[in-house]
């Protein structure tokens, strides 16, 4: 194993020892297979390549101060992959098969779970795609389920420090009756134009608005948006937003902390009234937003006075991360210890 600088890991790919694979054929899933290859042999007419029959998940394993490895709400990832499979008509991965695969891949690559205190974690990527050959536009008859892992650092290099976001209006991530609520690759391909535009302009990520009126906030690139105002946690409600497991968890923690919660359409003009804003997701966890720049109007919204995250965002972040690392009581039963 190569020597890794755990504290300075990027959010990128690092080769690990093993991955897990499973094939759906003749109407049923086969047995899990362990592979040490980073490559997959795929038919050139596979529907995953041509027609976007593909979905994935993102989750993490954390090593606590006690040395134990913990998974956070893996069952919600399993259920979301089921919804994504249904959304693009793929064979669903049974929850127990999903669980067996992720536990096995973490155990096999246990030495790649970063040490406690480094700020790094082991990212787990379950992937499902149509591997069967079809030239006509139709669902495949065969599917492949793959799970690989890689140690990662923070999604934004700033970590839990304020990031800069740009509002983009000349591209959309997903349409209301499209695939926005599913975790499929096409949504991320559609987001690349906005991501690159924002980054070239000096921002960390784009803010996407609703596709119809360009008035309401949808998502922050690959993360959900939230805001704090009058002791209330506010997050957009939209038919084209991915159901974030992190956001769902923060909503529960906000209620635990005595905050009110509003999930509703959030208009752009509300940005100037918020006390704190942030992005949340598995990769980012919580990234406080220090500045939102409307590239079209030139209007700039600033938060995080003194360059520090707001007090409520900080409390939510510390509570969530504390649960993930086993330092805060898991009263909702979200943690699974890898035995």
Image (spheres, rainbow, N blue to C red):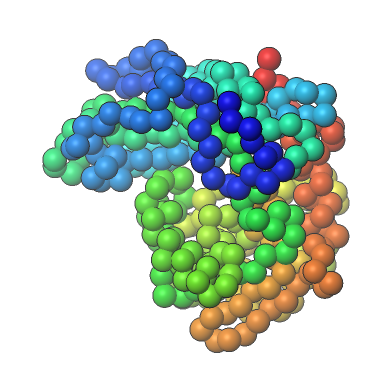
Image quarter of the N terminus: top right
Relative image position of residue 195 (x, y in whole percent): 48, 64
> In the picture shown, does residue 263 fall above or below 61?
below
Q: Determine the residue located farthest toward the front in the rendered image.
A: 3
Q: Is residue 145 left or right of residue 116?
A: left
> In the picture shown, does residue 16 fall above or below 153?
above
> In the picture shown, does residue 162 fall above or below 247?
below
Relative image position of residue 121 (x, y in whole percent): 66, 37
Q: Is residue 237 left or right of residue 44?
A: right
Determine if residue 6 is in view: yes
For image coordinates 63% across by 22% down, the residue present is 110
Q: Observer-nearest residue: 262 or 99? A: 99
For image coordinates 50% across by 71% down, the residue present is 200
Total numbered labels placed on residues in the image: 0
Relative image position of residue 272 (x, y in whole percent): 71, 79
For image coordinates 53% across by 55% down, the residue present is 222
For image coordinates 30% across by 45% down, the residue present is 52
Image quarter of the C terminus: top right
> In the picture shown, does residue 339 fall above or below 295?
above
Relative image position of residue 94 (x, y in whole percent): 45, 23
Q: Observer-nearest residue: 234 or 9? A: 9
Determine if residue 255 is in view: no
Q: Observer-nearest residue: 268 or 323? A: 323
Q: Determine the residue located farthest toward the left in the rendered image.
A: 135
Q: Is residue 315 left or right of residue 225?
A: right
The answer to which image quadrant residue 24 occupies is top left
């Amino acid at each position: 194993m190569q020597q890794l600088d755990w504290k300075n890991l990027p959010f990128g790919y690092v080769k690990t020892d093993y991955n897990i694979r499973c094939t759906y054929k003749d109407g049923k899933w086969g047995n899990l297979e362990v592979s040490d290859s980073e490559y997959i042999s795929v038919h050139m007419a596979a529907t995953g390549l041509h027609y976007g029959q593909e979905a994935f998940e993102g989750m993490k394993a954390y090593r606590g101060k006690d040395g134990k490895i913990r998974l956070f709400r893996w069952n919600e990832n399993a259920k979301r992959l089921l919804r994504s499979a249904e959304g693009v008509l793929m064979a669903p991965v049974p929850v127990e098969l999903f669980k067996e695969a992720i536990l096995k891949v973490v155990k096999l690559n246990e030495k790649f779970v970063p040490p406690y205190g480094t700020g790094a974690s082991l990212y787990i990527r379950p992937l499902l795609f149509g591997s069967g050959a079809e030239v006509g536009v139709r669902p495949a008859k065969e599917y492949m389920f793959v799970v690989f892992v890689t140690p990662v650092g923070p999604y934004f290099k700033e970590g839990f420090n304020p990031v800069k976001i740009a509002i983009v209006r000349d591209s959309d991530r997903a349409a209301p009756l499209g695939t926005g609520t599913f975790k499929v690759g096409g949504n991320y391909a559609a987001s690349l134009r906005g991501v690159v535009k924002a980054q070239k302009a000096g921002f960390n990520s784009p803010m996407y608005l609703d596709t119809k009126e360009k008035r309401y906030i949808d998502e922050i690139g690959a993360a959900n948006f939230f805001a704090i105002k009058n002791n209330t946690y506010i997050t957009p409600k939209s038919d084209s937003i991915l159901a974030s497991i992190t956001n769902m968890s923060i909503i529960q923690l906000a209620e635990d902390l005595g905050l009110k919660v509003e999930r509703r359409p959030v208009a752009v003009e509300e940005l100037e009234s918020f006390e704190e804003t942030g992005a949340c997701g598995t990769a980012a966890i919580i990234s406080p937003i220090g500045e939102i720049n409307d590239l079209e109007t030139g209007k700039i919204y600033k938060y995080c006075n003194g360059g520090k995250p707001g007090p409520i965002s900080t409390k939510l972040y510390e509570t969530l991360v504390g649960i993930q690392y086993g330092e805060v009581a898991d009263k909702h039963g979200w943690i699974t210890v890898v035995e």
